[in-house]
Image (cartoon, rainbow, N blue to C red):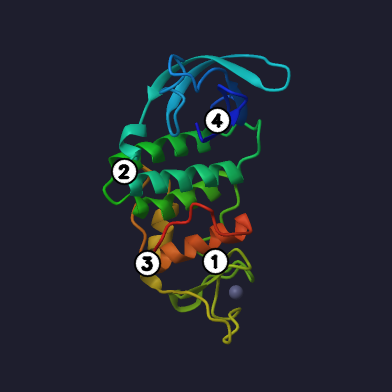
């Protein structure tokens, strides 16, 4: 469950991310009553097996069983803030009604990773890159987004407006852009590598974290509301 808003006296409209239809809204009837069996199950970040009835406009959740509940550990403020950011990005980037199994796996894995991590914020750059990749909008990490050529001297600059990384030939010197050196570029490639594959890396270097942040702002058209304090 990504988010919820109240409906009437006792119900909620919940925004879910599902295996079958990706992002969708559904009605959780009576969920705000203490006796409701849905309360405590349909909580932020929980992964549930749901039974739904087709409603007039929105489907209605009639039964929920918890599959995975990282929720208790997400209550810790930093974990919760990171989980909120993750939910916001999924919500903003994914079209309703479109099944995205790779994004589902990424989200589920990320929420568990956040729940288990003492430095959850450090997981965000890799998650963001993998999300852009799952959606097919990640920029190349080994070539200039403007001219398509390999980076010169293993140096690149982050061009938020172009939504990618540019080479020294394409960089206008008056623009104050984040510079990535050879180690940063290697780190970027490691973060972009799927988990379990050779060369996959988890932790972002500081400039790389800023770079990925700039890409997210480019694609979102704004800073995420749940932006983390650096
Ligand atoms: Zn170039």
Residue 111 in which image quadrant: top left
Q: Give neighbour class at mark 2: few <14, some 14-19, many 20+ (Cα, 10 Å).
A: few
- Indicate left or right for 55 with 51 as reference: right
Disc 2 to disc 4, C-alpha distance: 22 Å
Q: Is residue 218 above or below residue 64?
A: below
Tag 3 or tag 2, which sits nearer the N-term? Answer: 2
Tag 1 or tag 3, which sits nearer the N-term? Answer: 1
- Indicate left or right for 220 with 125 as reference: right
Q: Secondary structure at mark 3?
A: helix
Q: Give neighbour class at mark 3: few <14, some 14-19, many 20+ (Cα, 10 Å).
A: few
Give the label, 3 or 1, closer to the camera. 3
Q: Give neighbour class at mark 1: few <14, some 14-19, many 20+ (Cα, 10 Å).
A: some
Q: Residue lying furthest bottom in this view?
A: 174
Image marks 3 and 1: residues in contact by CB distance under 8 Å? no
Residue 143 in which image quadrant: bottom right
Disc 2 to disc 3, C-alpha distance: 24 Å
Residue 83: x percent and y percent? 42, 43
Disc 3 to disc 1, C-alpha distance: 21 Å
Q: Give neighbour class at mark 4: few <14, some 14-19, many 20+ (Cα, 10 Å).
A: many
Disc 3 to disc 4, C-alpha distance: 32 Å
Nearest to the observer: residue 23 or residue 32:
32
Q: Residue at label 1? A: 143
Tag 4 or tag 1, which sits nearer the N-term? Answer: 4
Q: Residue at label 2? A: 76
Give the label, 1 or 4, closer to the camera. 4
Q: Residue at label 4? A: 16
């Amino acid at each position: 469950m990504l988010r919820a808003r109240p409906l009437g006296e006792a119900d909620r409209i919940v925004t879910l991310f599902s295996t079958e239809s990706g992002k969708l809204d559904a009605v959780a009837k009576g969920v705000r009553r203490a006796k409701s069996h849905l309360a405590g199950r349909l909580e932020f970040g929980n992964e549930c097996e749901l039974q739904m009835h087709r409603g007039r406009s929105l489907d209605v959740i009639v039964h929920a069983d918890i599959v995975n509940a990282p929720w208790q550990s997400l209550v810790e403020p930093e974990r919760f803030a990171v989980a909120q950011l993750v939910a916001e990005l999924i919500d903003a980037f994914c079209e309703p009604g479109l099944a995205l199994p790779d994004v589902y796996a990424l989200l589920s894995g990320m929420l568990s990773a956040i729940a288990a991590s003492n430095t959850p914020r450090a997981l965000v750059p890799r998650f963001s890159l993998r999300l852009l990749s799952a959606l097919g909008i990640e920029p190349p990490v080994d070539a200039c987004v403007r001219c398509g050529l390999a980076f010169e001297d293993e140096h690149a600059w982050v061009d938020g407006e172009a939504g990618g990384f540019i080479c020294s030939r394409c960089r206008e010197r008056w623009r104050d852009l984040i510079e990535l050196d050879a180690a940063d570029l290697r780190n970027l490639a490691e973060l972009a590598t799927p988990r379990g594959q050779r060369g996959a890396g988890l932790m972002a270097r500081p400039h790389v974290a800023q770079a990925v942040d700039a890409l997210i702002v480019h694609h979102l058209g704004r800073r995420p509301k749940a932006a983390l304090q650096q």
